Structures are given as C-alpha cells and as structure tokens.
Amino acid sequence: MVSRVRVWDLPTRIFHWSLALGLVGLVVTGEAGGNAMVWHFLLGYTVLSLLLFRLVWGFVGGHWSRFSAFVVGPMTILRYIKGHAAPRPSLGHNPLGSLSVLALLGFALLQVATGLVSDDEIATTGPLVKMVPGYWVGKATYYHSEIGKFVLIALVLLHIAAMAFYHLKHKEPLVPAMWHGDKECVDSKVKSARDDGMSRLLAVVVFAVCASAVTGLVQWAD
C-alpha cells in the first residue's frame, strides 16, 4: 500500500527556496555593482543567516532534514555510484544528493565569509576587513570575485541537472516534494518528519537567533 510521508518540513522548504532566491540575487547585484552593492550586502547577510539556520536545523529539524539522516561516508557514496543499493531508506537525499547538499552549503558559507572580508579597493569593503591582515583580505577578495561565485554557479547548475536526470531517468519528481513536502512510499515503517506548530515555532526562534547574531556581528564591526 502506497502512503504519503512528510519528508521536507516547512522550515526546510522555506530555507531551500529562500537560499535559491538569495544566491540568484547575490549574483545579479554583484555583477551590477554600483548602488546595487547595497542590496548585495543585505542579501549576503540574509544568506549567511539562512546558512547558520540550516546548520542548526541539521541537528534539531525534521528527521529527513537532519545531517544524521543523510550524511554518509565516502565508501557509501562510492558503492552508490557503482550501482549498489543504499544501505538505508533514501526518501530524503541519496548519497550523491547528500554530497551535493554539503558542497552547496559549504561553498555558499565560504563565499559569504570571504565577502565579509573582501575589499575591491574602489568603493566596496566588507564589514570585517579591518579585523583581518591585508594579505588575507587580498586572498579572500580574489577568491570571492574570481573563483567562489563560479564554483557556486557550477554547483547550482549541477544540482538542477541532477534533478532533471532523476525526473527523466528514474521518474522521480524531486521538485514537487520540495514544494509540498511529501513523497510516496510503500514502506509503512519509514519515519515521517515532524512538521507541526511547535517545530515551526522552533524554526522561527532559531532563524531569529541566527539573524540577530549576524546583525550583531556587522554592527559590532562597524
């Protein structure tokens, strides 16, 4: 009997689409320059808040959003690539998907962090530049403008291509599940993610704390 299982809780879904919009906005405003850099910084602070939230939510969020539910070792990923079945249910991210998620989170965090200490020596200076030696400011600026953004764009395109592949090859529609949160499953023992009023309230509190921390850091630096 096929049943619907809540895989992605509402906070995870909001994070996912907010991060996607934030990254697009960062690329657009970064390329536009000029007055758009005001929005670039605001989006950067927002994306940093989202990433910090996701790191915390990876420990206290719904079952399938927790790192313990999808982070696996390199041998598991290698077995999956070779065509062996996953050692546990993969209603959430499969081993390759987990690697993609970690790469996106890691490089997005690195991109935002280097932005905080970047200086184009013209009109744009990150809020934490004065706290970092000039040598590292130069390295961070070069990575942020010449390497990091292209790595992120490549990862996002790879992510989209992977979703298209699973939809066409395996008939597994991944995008709808990230809209409504549910997937169909024949195993009645598969755990459903908690997604009730209390968990959503917790998410609001966690994000508020993360956003306050980022705001406090920027204000303290200024």
Image (cartoon, rainbow, N blue to C red):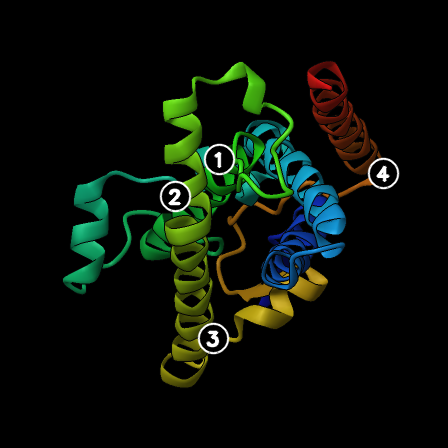
**Residue on which disc 4 sits:** 197
The first of marks 2 and 4 along the sequence is 2
Q: Amino acid at mark 3?
A: Glu
Secondary element type, mark 2: helix
Mark 4 crowd level (few <14, some 14–19, many ≥20, 10 Å Cα) = few
The label shown at residue 172 is 3
Image quadrant containing the N terminus: bottom right
The residue under label 2 is 143
Name the residue that disc number 1 marks: 114
Q: Position of residue 92 (x, y in %)?
A: 49, 53
Lower sequence index among marks 4 and 3 = 3
Q: Is residue 179 left or right of residue 186?
A: right
Residue at position x 50%, y 45% in the image: 108
Against 106, residue 100 (above or below) is below
| Mark 4: secondary structure | helix
Q: Amino acid at mark 2?
A: Tyr
Q: Position of residue 181 (x, y in %)?
A: 67, 59
**Spatial CA span between label 2 and label 3:** 36 Å
Q: Residue at x 42, y 35 (%)?
A: 140
Quadrant in which the C terminus appears: top right
Packing grade of label 2 (10 A; few <14, some 14-19, many >=20) is some
Q: Quadrant of residue 69?
A: top left
Q: Secondary structure at mark 1?
A: helix
* Three-letter residue code for mark 1: Thr
